[in-house]
Amino acid sequence: MLIRLDGKDALYLQVYRALRQAILDTDLGPGSRLPPTRLLSRDLGVSRNVVLQAYDQLYAEGYVEGKVGAGTFVASELPEELLQAIRTSHQDGPRETVERRLSAWGQRALRSGAPTRTPPYPEPPLRWDFQYGEVAPDEQCLKLWRRLLARRAENLHLNYSPAEGWPELRVHLSEYVRRSRGALCSPEQVLVVNGSQQALDLSARLLIEPGDPVVIEEPHYQGARQSFLSAGARLVAAPVDDEGLNLSAVDTEGARLAYITPSHQFPTGAVMSLARRLEMLDWAESHDAYLLEDDYDSEYRYGSRPVESVQGLDRRGRTIYIGTLSKVLFPSLRLGFMVLPEDLLPPFVAGKWLLDRQSPTLEQAVLADFISEGHFERHLRRMRTLNAERRRVLLEALEEHLGDAVEIQGTNAGVHLLVWFRHLRAVEMDDLIRRAAARGVGIYSVDRYFLSPPERGGLVLGYSSMSPPEIRRGVAELAKAIRDE
């Protein structure tokens, strides 16, 4: 423990004052363990008796307490004068802010709208939370994962792994996307990344110069927008209709990158038509550009066969395919992958190496086992069934409680619905969100996914984290919040 002695009075008093000040400043909070006396005396270069005397003084004044066989801890209930000192120190006001010098990238990152801190959870916690991207724990999957993790942990790989990813995992991922998405790829074209957000960041860093136009869908995934803005891109928002992104509606002169979610447009749910897909590929070839295909939830389709990826139609190496495992397994896994044109693999591997050297090896090895032993596809089939039931219940509940008051998009795939209100405006959404939260319901406005927010109000309702009964109750409470009962 690093403490500073002030050189005044006896040594034990100096140690006592330093520790007391650490408690006053809450550097040592209630319940914190103090260092063993032998260790602290060695670190400070004083005798153990000096530290023992300092601890005795802290005991006497009620700042610390001992636990037999465990050590010395800051008291859970502090003396009143100490509490008063803490309150006084907190009333001194905020520290003076100092403007820090940032790089151009750092300044753009701050302006991009990317989160600068984790927002606090509502108090009380939301009982029925329609947050998109959350995943309900699947006990069968977690039990298998723990078993495979324990097996791999018995023989840990402790050295560096290839920056492009664990070799076995790259083989299994390439086989999976060839079989399920019609992708054209070899294991050598697969790059393992820390989730799709790192794939977006890598693409922005390696393919965009400040001022470059980048085509994005309108509306769109905000994480892509933030990555492109941080790279200094000038965003060209192309409208989305029933056939997907409409490239002919915007001026794409000078653009060398277009971001698309063709298999299940986020957040509208539109599926890009074959004609539009071929048009996008022709545009990329004629403009010496790349298509960044984000296939974020193609595993979940209901009542229709999976749609072939744009990458699977590409014979000219113009498509960068992004896949993620967050919606399928669990978000904290932070593993995704890219399928890259062969000529782009060297710069992307170099960029990955510079960013973090490699993704965690243990998790990659466990995922490789999870796929190779057939657990992954069995888990997918089970989750499709569960999410199809959640989707059915959500649609029925919306029909029952809101009926013609809403228009629903994105019903055939994914783990969310886009719900438009016919008689509520976008400016009314914040008030509705507050009223719903007061009832324990978490809802989220579609505004964040637009560069130019729409006039009418809309919500993105995720349903993969709740049970059918919770979904029914959540929609019923939402309806009451809308009526302001």
Image (cartoon, rainbow, N blue to C red):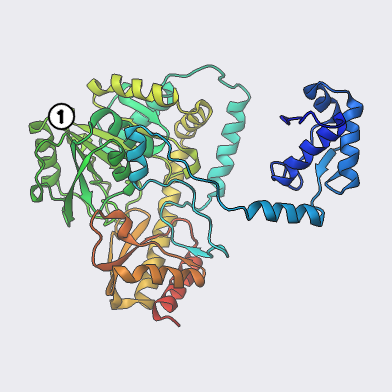
Can you name the residue that lies furthest to the top here? Answer: 159
Residue at x 28% of width, y 59% of height = 410
Q: Residues within 10 Å of mark 1 (few under 14, many from 20)?
A: few
Q: Residue furthest front?
A: 8
- Is residue 349 found left or right of 6 in the rendered image? left
- In the rendered image, the residue lying farthest to the bottom is 485
Residue 170: horizontal and vertical position, in percent?
38, 26
Looking at the rendered structure, the kind of residue marked 1 is Arg
Location of residue 193 in the rendering, given as x and y in whole percent from the top left corner: 40, 31
Instruction: Look at the image and tell me in which quarter the N terminus lies.
Output: top right
Residue at image coords 29%, 57%: 412
> Residue 68, can we see it?
no
Q: As displayed, is residue 428 above or below residue 378?
A: below
Q: In terms of depth relative to the viewer, which is nearer, 250 or 19?
A: 19
Q: Is residue 327 left or right of residue 320?
A: right
Relative horizontal placement of residue 320, taking residue 44 as reference (left or right): left
Between residues 419 and 173, which one lies in front from this camera angle? 419
Q: Nearer the viewer, residue 158 or 64?
A: 64
In the image, what residue occupies the spot 9% across and 45% down?
251
The percent coordinates of residue 396 (x first, y second) are 37, 71
Q: Is residue 375 above or below residue 355?
A: below
Q: How many marks?
A: 1
Instruction: Assign a secondary structure to mark 1.
Output: loop
Q: Is residue 289 left or right of residue 337?
A: left
Q: Is residue 198 visible?
A: yes
Pointer 1 residue: 315
Specify the quadrant of the image occupied by residue 81. bottom right
Q: Is residue 485 above or below residue 61?
A: below
- Quadrant of the rendering where the C terminus is positioned: bottom left
Q: Nearer the viewer, residue 170 or 350?
A: 350
